[in-house]
């Protein structure tokens, strides 16, 4: 059984918006901080946003003020609202579950990963 399943990616013009969703298994959702990462072609995976079990959030500098991470406890679902998208936001977006309860943007701290969803921002 997949523990994290992303959806909501697609193509959008620069300046547009997208919302990503990640369905999380109940056990994983209740025990781990969650986060969004992205990987552009030829680049390493980088942390985008994370949310802890207590609701605290953490954002990477390039997305501060444009992206918002949230979660729905009734649906065990993680979201990433992305506004004012730029071509440099293009990449495969992954949701993950960390080995800690507080928000983290370090990939090594994450234990479980989804398969990813592609986001393409055209200039």
Image (cartoon, helix red, strand yellow):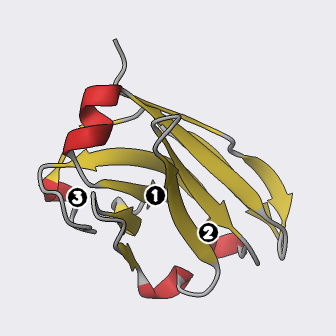
Report the side of 79 relative to 56 (left or right): right
Residue 12 placed where, x, y %?
83, 58
Residue 46 placed where, x, y %?
36, 66
Q: Residue at the location (45% across, 36% down)?
A: 76
Q: Are marks 2 and 3 in contact (CB under 8 Å)?
A: no
Label 1 neighbour load within 10 Å: few <14, some 14-19, many 20+: many
Residue 91 placed where, x, y %?
56, 56
Report the side of 43 relative to 80 (left or right): left
Measured in 3D between alpha carbons, the distance from the residue under mark 2 to the one under mark 3, in whole angstroms, is: 18 Å
According to the picture, the residue beneath numbered tag 3 turns out to be 107
Measured in 3D between alpha carbons, the distance from the residue under mark 2 to the one under mark 1, in whole angstroms, is: 8 Å
Location of residue 51 by image quarter: bottom left
Mark nearer the N terminus (1 vs 3): 1
Measured in 3D between alpha carbons, the distance from the residue under mark 1 to the one under mark 3, in whole angstroms, is: 10 Å
Report the side of 8 relative to 29 (left or right): right
Q: Nearer the viewer, residue 102 or 35?
A: 102
Residue 107 placed where, x, y %?
22, 58
According to the picture, the residue beneath numbered tag 2 turns out to be 89
Label 3 neighbour load within 10 Å: few <14, some 14-19, many 20+: some
Circle 3 SS class: helix
Q: Are marks 2 and 1 in contact (CB under 8 Å)?
A: yes
Q: Is residue 79 above or below residue 123?
A: above
Total numbered labels = 3
Label 2 neighbour load within 10 Å: few <14, some 14-19, many 20+: many
Disc number placed over residue 47 in the picture, else none: none
Q: Are marks 1 and 3 in contact (CB under 8 Å)?
A: no
In the rendered image, the quadrant that contains the C terminus is: bottom right
Circle 2 SS class: helix
In the rendered image, the quadrant that contains the N terminus is: top left
According to the picture, the residue beneath numbered tag 1 turns out to be 38
Q: Residue at the location (67% across, 66% down)?
A: 82
């Amino acid at each position: 059984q997949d523990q994290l399943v992303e959806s909501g990616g697609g193509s959008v013009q620069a300046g547009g918006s997208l919302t990503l969703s990640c369905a999380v298994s109940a056990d994983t959702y209740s025990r781990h901080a969650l986060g969004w990462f992205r990987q552009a072609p030829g680049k390493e995976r980088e942390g985008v946003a994370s949310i802890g079990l207590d609701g605290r959030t953490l954002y990477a500098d390039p997305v501060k003020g444009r992206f918002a991470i949230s979660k729905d406890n009734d649906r065990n679902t993680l979201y990433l609202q992305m506004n004012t998208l730029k071509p440099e936001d293009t990449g495969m977006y992954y949701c993950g579950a960390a080995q800690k309860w507080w928000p983290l943007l370090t990939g090594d701290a994450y234990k479980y990963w989804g398969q990813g969803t592609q986001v393409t921002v055209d200039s």
